[in-house]
Each structure stands twice: as structure tokens, then as C-alpha cells.
Amino acid sequence: MTSVLGLACRECGRPYPAEALHVCDFCFGPLEVVYDYDEIKKKISRESIEKGPLSIWRYHELLPAHETSSIDLRAGFTPLVRAERLAQELGLGELWLKDDTRNPTGSFKDRVVAVALAKARELGFKIASCASTGNLANSVAAHAARAGMSAYVFIPSDLEHVKVAMTAIFNLKLVAVDGNYDDVNRLCAEIASEHPDWAFVNVNVRPYYSEGSKTLAFEVAEQLGWRAPDHVVVPVGSGSQLTKIHKGFHELEKVGLIEDGHSVRVSGAQAEGCSPVATAFAEGTDQIRPVRPHTIAKSLAIGNPADGWYALQVVRETGGAMGSVSDPEIVDAIRLLARTEGIFAETAGGVTVATLAKLAREGVIRKDEVVVAYITGNGLKTVEALGDSVGPSVVIPPTLEAFSAFEREQEGTKS
Ligand SMILES: [Zn+2]
């Protein structure tokens, strides 16, 4: 069994049973999973984890669902790659990239969905649902298909073509809503109360869902040889992923898997066209003012981020920073990452790399730090964002003469 004690309100601490609940009846604070860490400490070791499956389920003791109810698409345990060429370009030292483009549906969302739907199955749900900016839709659709569950997925109608196709292919009810993500999310909160028999991964099973992001910290620590990095850079949409990565490193300390007392600085990355958390950080306020998103980084286009306040606190407490970058900077960063490291990231990855570069220039991220940047989604999902900036070097007729002319021209441009 997992060592879950139940849920508790993050604000007032009131306890709740480990059921499909997400908000405190008394203060409307969000609920969070509570574990018995002493019990977990007795059960796990570095060795037992290293013998586990090559997926997030190697950390099942620190997750709120049992491995046996998991839906096996192999979410997680993605590569952590040393990025020497990118580090050199940015003037950084030991830089690593967590390559979550390699997940089953091409984004980190497979981690949270795998946990949410495993828990949903334990609770007896037959229907999966979500409000999504795209990546979550892809993942819920695929995992529901694999589990033989029905699914209702709600998306903004202006989503990237690939994200729509990658959801619809799994044969579910896909509802495109004329509005932005915040509109879709508001609608889903209403639908969720009409349909208590649906597992809305980011509504009524959100406390379990969000725990899946902790595996982004667990894996990094294990892959670094059971040590925490000095500084991490995380893209911020709802803010949940950032807070859970922070929580993940703390949990590893609590259960004795990594050395105690090494504080990880956590920095967050947003697109300028949707940067409510970065704006609050820059203004030194706790007030996160909702915005109307306008950016190519659609997976991060959440104007009213549910965990924005918590993300802001983590960034401040750990001595990190929030950065925001423009759409052209995002595209340049996608190209920089591809050119230096051979990784093709979606726009959110461009946001992370561009912010990494910015914070390095500003001296916030230092050369003597071990840095991990989270690349959370695959570039094939957001090809439109690249526009005319990608294409063939030249178009020629099928003759050697034409190719030789092109070669000579290249030689010319070199000198
Ligand atoms: Zn409460």
C-alpha cells in the first residue's frame, strides 16, 4: 500500500479523506496529499528504486496511487542530458537538460495524467476528463484509451493543429470551446459539479494529478547520482509543476535519499504575452493580476494561474527569479537548443531556454552552479510557431551543376 494518510488543506490544514476532493469546505484552500514519511523512509532505499520500472512508478512509494492500478504507457524516467555546447554559448558551467519531449505523448503531462488516472481507477471512475491547453488533452486521451476509459476533453478552439489531431485520434469526445484556456477552465468547473462521476484530472482529482510532477525532481536527483542540483529553471503555466518540483527535492531529503539541507534555487519562466507571475515577481508584490494571454507559447497561456501565488513564494524563498521572454526570443531559443544539443522543443521549451539565457546574462544563474532546465514538450507539437524561420537551405533542379553552384555560393558566404 502507499503511505498516504489523506488530504489536507494547504491553507488551514484541515484533514480530508483521500477521495475525489480538491478544495477545502471551510476556507476554499486547495487540498494536498499528506504522506507518512517515517513509514516511507523504512520502505525505500536508493537500491530498491534503482531496481524499479523505467517509469515514474519506480517512485510509487512517494506517489498517491498504487503502481498496480497504473496505466502503462511508460511515462517518465526520461533522459537527463549534459548540455556542454549550450552551456558554453550561455556562459554557464554544469548545465543539464531534463528531456521530457521523450514521454509517450511528448510532454511532461504524461507524468501527472498517469498518476491522476491511476488514482481515478482506484476510486472507481470510468470517465476521464480535463480542461487543457493541448498537452494535457493529448495525454488524457491516450491514457484513457489505453485503460479502456471514456473521455471528455475540453480545449480552446484556437489550439495548434497537431495537438488537436493528437487528441482526436484516440477516439473520445473532444469539445473545442470558443474562448481562451481560462474560459474553458471556468466552464469545466461548472461541468465537473454537474458530473461528479467524471474524473476531471485537473479539477476533482487535482491533488493526485499534481503530485505526478514531483517525479521531475526525483529523477533528476537520481540521475545526478543522488544529489540535488543548485538551480532549476521551470516553465510556469498554472505554477503547479514548479511547486511540485520544489516539493519533490524536499521529500527526497525527508526520506533520506539525498543529503539534507542543500537548498535548490528554483526559477520560473513565462512568456511575456502571459506573465502574471513574472510581473508580480518584478513588482515585488504578492498580488497576481490575471491577464488575457497572447503568446505563441499556448501550453503556458494560463492568464489566471491556480498555483501562481505558491509558485511565487517558492521562487522567492529559494532565492530564484522569475523571467519572461518575447515570442521572437522563444523561437530563437527553440533554434538555439536544436542547434547546440539536438533537441527539438515545443514553445514552452523555448520559454525555458530563453529565460535560462536571460537569467544567465543577468548573473542570477551563476557559472559555479549545477543547473537543470526542464524541457517539457516536443517541438513537433508546435511547428506553426516557427513560421517561415525553418525550411530548406535552397531549392534546386535535379542537376549536379545546380548543386555545385549552391556549394560555391556557400563557400562564398563563409569567407
Ligand atoms: Zn482550509
Image (cartoon, rainbow, N blue to C red):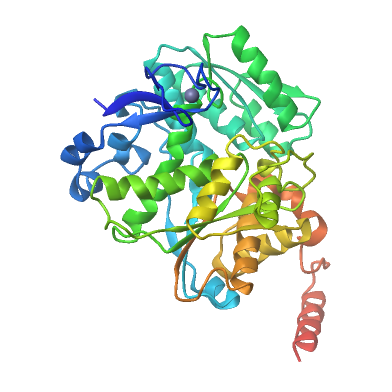
Q: Position of residue 10 (x, y in %)?
A: 46, 31
Asked which quadrant contains residue 222, the reply is: bottom left
Let me know if residue 107 appears in the view.
Answer: no
Let me know if residue 7 appears in the view.
Answer: yes
Quarter the C terminus occupies:
bottom right
Q: Position of residue 158 (x, y in %)?
A: 79, 34
Q: Position of residue 332 (x, y in %)?
A: 72, 64
Q: Position of residue 177 (x, y in %)?
A: 76, 23
Q: Residue at image x 24%, y 48%?
A: 50
Asked which quadrant contains residue 64, the reply is: top left
In this rendering, the answer to whether 301 lies above or below 395 is above
Quarter the N terminus occupies:
top left
Q: Nearer the viewer, residue 260 or 70?
A: 260
Q: Nearer the viewer, residue 231 or 120?
A: 231
Q: Residue at image x 67%, y 35%?
A: 133
In this rendering, the answer to whether 246 lies above or below 325 is above
Asked which quadrant contains residue 132, the reply is: top right
Q: Residue at image x 69%, y 36%?
A: 304
Q: Nearer the viewer, residue 84 or 65?
A: 65
Relative placement, left or right, of 306 versus 409 is left
